[in-house]
Amino acid sequence: NTKYRPTAPIQLADRRWPSQVISQPPIWMSTDLRDGNQALFEPMSAARKLEMFEMLCRIGFKEIEVAFPSASQTDFDFVRKLIEENRVPQDVTLEVLTQAREHLIRRSFESLKGARRAIMHVYNATAPNFRRTVFNVDRAGCIRIATDAAKLVRECAEAQPDTEWVFQYSPETFSSTELEFALEISNRVMEVWEPTPERPAILNLPATVECATPNVFADQVEWMCRNLQRRDAIIVSVHPHNDRGTAVAAAELAVMAGADRVEGCLFGNGERTGNVDLVTLALNLYTQGVDPGLDFSRINEVARTAETCTQLPIHPRHPYVGDLVFTAFSGSHQDAIKKGFAAQDPKAIWEVPYLPVDPQDLGRTYDSIIRVNSQSGKGGISYLLESAYGLVMPRRMQVEFSNEVQQVMDDTGREQSAQDIWAIFERSYLTA
Ligand code: KIV
Ligand code: ZN
């Protein structure tokens, strides 16, 4: 990705102030069909799940959490459908979630019979208030739940040797758990699975409820990365939720702090305020000169499919994808964008003012960039006439004509389209 300027670390003579940048993408895991799905008014039907699954594959996700099969028959049947109808591309790994309970683990293995490769994702909550209030266990009891589950997963995996199994453990509520305890339970669970660098396991660290500033979450992740017993055999993953509205920042800082993998959903769907938005996260990398390895070059299609499957609208100001994000209303912005387009060398680093990304890279057009309302100036008005009607006005005429358009907008309070402006132009200059 040479079109966008990579972020350079801040270089100061004072070396005590280093700055980190992200120089390669994390492993991506989409949980749209699990965490995203479980947060919908109406969970997706099998047809919608399939539509979403196929789109996730086209975007380039190689790990997709497709279901919570022990929690619902629809989810169980969906996993069966993917396997029996041979719908999983060779390079895509199915993932399913299960609580750390015997019958649920067994049922989850049943759902995955015949899978080529699968991630069995086991979780139990580890934070003090969950231990006390929800499960009534002490630390030892909490560890026992997790290690018993890991032993059973190992047994079941050995009994289904035709599938290549990857083990994933989440200390749910990690970010609210005492760090030494989170480390202890993670180490104990991994001792049961015995991962190796050739056959690594995934340790997923969720901010189940985002409750601290992103730097604090990143510090927690960094401390885990530094202290884990078998770091060389463990893929450290993060699963940020967006309760404080800072999940994207938390994920970015966590990757800088050592996380290898990020779990989230398209456009930030997911429980409550959502999971981290993988679209924003990926495109933030792209516009910093790092290829995210995910294809959002037809982002409108992705957005419409996501809206259909989830029945949730995307906000018009959503980064990169919202209807308004490549639109400038104010005159000074329009003027700068117009000059920027004229000066942009197609082979050089992207530098059009006010547009952090070339809309064309996302399959969007320039059409809606310049829109004209009472905040706009002559630049936008003449741009619309020039681009839609090929009309180039001399400067004095631009000033005079924009006053007329301005008057119409002051009177009506309405945005004026290229056609509206052309009609004003015709009235003023072309009719006798
Ligand atoms: O948010 C969470 O902690 C989860 C876990 C089950 C990974 O979704
Ligand atoms: Zn979650």
Image (cartoon, rainbow, N blue to C red):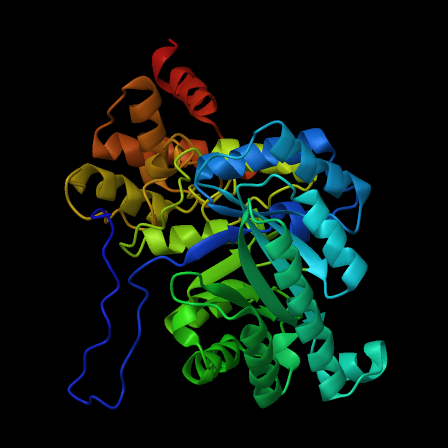
Q: Is residue 250 above or below residue 155?
A: below
Residues 273 and 401: in front is 273
Give the residue displayed 36% in from the left and 50% down from the top. 292
Q: Position of residue 215 (x, y in %)?
A: 47, 79
Q: Is residue 213 left or right of residue 60?
A: right
Q: Nearer the viewer, residue 82 or 418?
A: 82
Q: Is residue 134 visible?
A: yes
Number of numbered labels in the structure image: 0
Q: Is residue 68 in view from this perspective?
A: no
Q: Quadrant of residue 100?
A: bottom right
Q: Position of residue 12 (x, y in %)?
A: 18, 83
Residue 319 at what x, y percent from top left? 48, 50
Residue at the (44%, 43%) spot, across then down: 329
Q: Is residue 428 left or right of residue 397?
A: right
Rendered image quadrant of residue 132: bottom right
Picture quarter with the C terminus:
top left
Q: Is residue 81 left or right of residue 102?
A: left
Residue shown at 47% from the left, 77% from the top: 218
Q: Is residue 180 above or below residue 373?
A: below
| Residue at image coords 46%, 53% | 28
Which one is nearer the viewer's eye here, 398 or 249?
A: 249
